[in-house]
Image: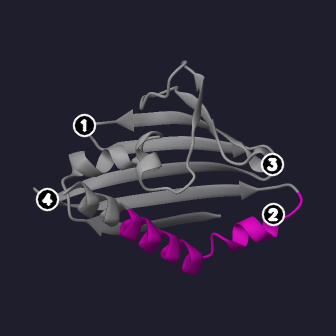
Amino acid sequence: VSRSGSFDLRCAADTAFPFFSPEGEREWVKGWNPTPVFPDSIEFRRDTVFREGPPDDEAVWTIVDGNWKTHRAEYVRVAPRSHAARIVVQIEALGAEHCKVVVAYTITAFGEHPATLIGSFSEEAYAVKMRAWQEQISTCLKDRT
């Protein structure tokens, strides 16, 4: 299944982009705790590989693109027990302190309960996810001031 959604943030694109890095997500995703595979530290650049998730469904993530000039990040995520995914984040500047975040997921589910995972990516569920991300990041931005 493929889904794309977007939301606005009241900050510059340069401020928003790091929120979608492996380390930046720690600031707004509860329980997010990536660990490096290659290199020895998690860098927001192409070919960085890290692990994240609970032991029973840990995923291996690879950064395919992390372009600071275009504000584009692309990841491939493989959770061997449940799914593979391609995630693309593109941030568009709408003004000096306003940007639009577009997040696209393509998920291939497998394993014991593929329908459950696919169901969590329904159009309605994805819209809820985008609103939650907007709220969580907006809260982080407010806490910084």
Disc 4 secondary structure class: loop
Q: Quadrant of residue 111?
A: bottom right
Q: Which of marks 4 and 2 precedes in the sequence?
A: 4
What stretch of residues is rendered in magenta? 112-136
According to the picture, the residue beneath numbered tag 1 turns out to be: 69
- Residue 131 appears at what percent x and percent y? 43, 74
Q: Which of marks 4 and 3 precedes in the sequence?
A: 3
Disc 3 to disc 4, how far (Cα)? 41 Å
Q: Quadrant of residue 78?
A: top right
Q: Amino acid at mark 4?
A: Glu
Quick check: is 125 in the magenta stretch?
A: yes
Q: Which mark is residue 112?
A: none
Q: Which of marks 2 and 1 precedes in the sequence?
A: 1
Disc 3 secondary structure class: helix
- Looking at the image, residue 16 sits to the left or right of residue 20; the answer is left
The reply to whether dot 3 and dot 1 touch (C-beta < 8 Å) is no
- Looking at the image, residue 113 sits to the left or right of residue 18; the answer is right
- Can you say whether 113 is above or below 18 in the image? below
- Looking at the image, residue 140 sits to the left or right of residue 12; the answer is right
Disc 2 to disc 4, how far (Cα)? 40 Å
Quick check: is 62 in the magenta stretch?
A: no
According to the picture, the residue beneath numbered tag 3 turns out to be: 56
Q: Which mark is residue 97?
A: 4
Residue shown at 49%/56% (left/top)? Answer: 29
Q: Which of marks 3 and 2 precedes in the sequence?
A: 3
Q: Which of marks 1 and 3 precedes in the sequence?
A: 3
